[in-house]
């Protein structure tokens, strides 16, 4: 299926490498104007050169998503330049390599995690997505249309021992996306999560892991479900998570959805709350 996103403006964070650059490529291919944001200026310059997008279709902006002021400023600038921000892809993160390179073969213990490192992970991997969502939602509500897509990880990684702070931050993102999907229902804003489905061939998986890189998931699998969610068929699709490795772009959409789609987070665990009056949503 061909998706036409001409006239839409997307902000992709963590755009300079790995998964981010493939999301940028996919959205550009669908005709969207893409604002590629990353903390690495040289990485963005390489991205712009590699993408060879038509003039005016790709904008690059250096962004530190751990700064609320920077997040608010980039959304305001996009709205001023483009008139609206239609699509927000929360992809940027720091990985466990920030602590040490061999974190996959010698898992990280709590004694190794300095409070400053914990705080940096939380600001970047969790708070940054909230800062951007908070800044983007008012404009999306005024337009009556918006897409928020957040990249999390496997439930195994979220709950894995000795994989902090990365795992808990991604679990927080998953829960936040579920809450926002419910909060924004009926506004025209959809909220969904996309995950690769396992270890992916990006710098987050170092060579020291011992994996054969040919066995890793290719980051390009992330683009097809994200582009589809941003198209007209995604208008009423919200509150879902998609395992991108299970999405077959060569088949029909119904089959791709059936193979990859499930509700965000853990709704089965929240189905019977103990609550005064029995209904927390009234």
Image: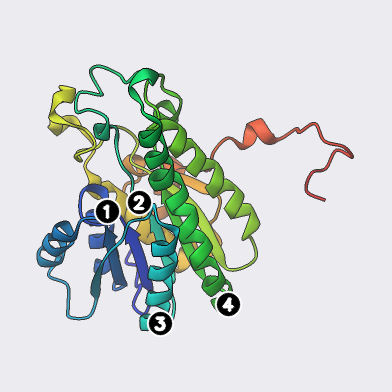
Image quarter of the N terminus: bottom left
Q: Are marks 3 and 2 in contact (CB under 8 Å)?
A: no
Residue 278: image quadrant is top right
The foreground one among 87 and 61 is: 61
Residue 39 in picture, x, y percent from top left = 26, 56
SS at circle 3: helix
Q: Which of marks 3 and 2 is in front?
A: 3
Q: Residue at x 21, y 42 (%)?
A: 218
Left-right relation of 51 to 63: left
Dot placed on the residue nearer the N-terminal end, 4 or 3: 3
Residue identified by numbered label 1: 20
Residue 142: image tag? 4
SS at circle 1: helix
Residue 91: image tag? 2
Residue 80: image tag? 3
- Binning the other alpha carbons within 10 Å of mark 1 as few (below 14), some (14 to 19) or many (20 upward) gives many
Dot placed on the residue nearer the N-terminal end, 4 or 1: 1
Per the model, the C-alpha gap separating discs 2 and 1 is 6 Å
Residue 4 in picture, x, y percent from top left = 34, 72
């Amino acid at each position: 299926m061909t998706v036409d996103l001409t006239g839409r403006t997307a902000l992709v964070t963590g755009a300079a490498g790995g998964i981010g650059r493939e999301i940028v490529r996919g959205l550009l291919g669908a005709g969207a104007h893409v604002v590629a944001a990353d903390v690495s200026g040289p990485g963005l310059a390489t991205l712009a050169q590699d993408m060879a997008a038509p003039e005016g279709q790709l904008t690059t902006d250096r962004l530190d998503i751990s700064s609320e002021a920077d997040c608010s400023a980039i959304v305001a600038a996009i709205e001023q330049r483009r008139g609206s921000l239609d699509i927000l892809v929360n992809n940027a993160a720091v990985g466990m390599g920030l602590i040490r390179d061999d974190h996959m073969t010698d898992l990280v213990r709590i004694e190794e995690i300095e409070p400053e490192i914990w705080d940096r992970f939380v600001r970047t991997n969790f708070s940054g997505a909230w800062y951007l969502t908070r800044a983007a939602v008012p404009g999306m509500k005024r337009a009556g249309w918006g897409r928020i897509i957040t990249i999390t990880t496997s439930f195994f990684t979220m709950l894995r021992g000795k994989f902090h702070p990365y795992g808990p931050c991604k679990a927080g993102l998953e829960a936040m996306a579920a809450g926002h999907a419910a909060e924004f229902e009926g506004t025209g804003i959809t909220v969904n999560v996309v995950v690769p489905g396992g270890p992916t061939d990006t710098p987050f998986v170092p060579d020291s892991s011992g994996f054969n890189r040919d066995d890793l998931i290719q980051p390009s699998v992330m683009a097809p479900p994200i582009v589809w969610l941003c198209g007209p068929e995604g208008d009423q699709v919200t509150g879902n998570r998609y395992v991108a490795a299970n999405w077959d772009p060569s088949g029909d959409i119904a089959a791709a959805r059936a193979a990859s789609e499930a509700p965000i987070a853990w709704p089965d665990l929240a189905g019977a709350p103990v609550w005064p009056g029995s209904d927390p949503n009234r």
